[in-house]
Amino acid sequence: MEKVTGIGGFFFRAKDPNRLAEWYRAHLGIDLIPTDADQEPWQQAGGPTAFSPFPEDTEYFGDPQKAWMMNFRVRDLDKMVTQLSAAGIAAQVDHEAYPHGRFARLHDPEGNPIELWEPVPA
């Protein structure tokens, strides 16, 4: 059985994303998503995690009533999507090639958005 390997990111709306992000960096030591190749992402046991407050009016999560979206890292996105499909769970694969990897979107039974991420091999 294919399983998620960890949290690839936690994205949420904020009234002042930059200020809130700075608070987390200053007080909890959580670095933000790198803006250039010389910066390192925040590291946790098990792999990298993207941390980025979004504007409170973002459309990135879909349903405006949902304040967050979980991002889970996976080893093999195609196998995970096939497994989900076999269970009757629809996942939409983003076919664009991104520098950081591949992505797919789905929703949990309550409609909460989930993103699956297959990072580019190191």
Image (spheres, rainbow, N blue to C red):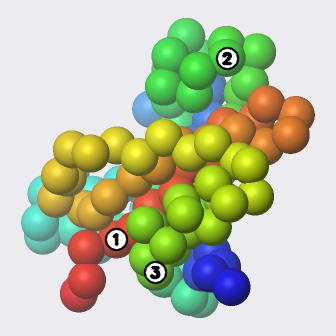
First of labels 3, 1 by sequence position: 3
Between marks 2 and 3, how big is the CA–CA gap? 28 Å
- Residue 90 vs 79, above or below: the answer is above
The residue identified by callout 2 is 63
Tell me the number on the disc at residue 119.
1
- Residue 60 vs 21, above or below: the answer is above
In front: label 3 or label 1: 3
Quarter where residue 15 is shown: top right
- Looking at the picture, which amino acid does disc 3 mark? Arg
Secondary structure category for the residue under label 2: loop
Tell me the number on the disc at residue 75.
3
Q: Quadrant of the C terminus?
A: bottom left
Q: Which residue occupies the extreme front position in the image?
A: 86
Residue drawn at point x = 88 percent, y = 34 percent = 110
Residue drawn at point x = 63 percent, y = 54 percent = 85
First of labels 2, 3 by sequence position: 2
The reply to whether dot 1 and dot 2 touch (C-beta < 8 Å) is no
The reply to whether dot 3 and dot 1 touch (C-beta < 8 Å) is no
Q: Is residue 68 left or right of residue 35?
A: right
Between marks 1 and 2, how big is the CA–CA gap? 26 Å
Residue drawn at point x = 86 percent, y = 40 percent = 109
Q: Which residue occupies the extreme right position in the image?
A: 110
Between marks 3 and 1, how big is the CA–CA gap? 8 Å
Q: Is residue 73 visible?
A: no
Residue toward you, 35 or 115: 115
- Tell me residue 22's x, y (percent): 49, 45
Residue toward you, 91 or 108: 91
Quarter where residue 20 is shown: top right
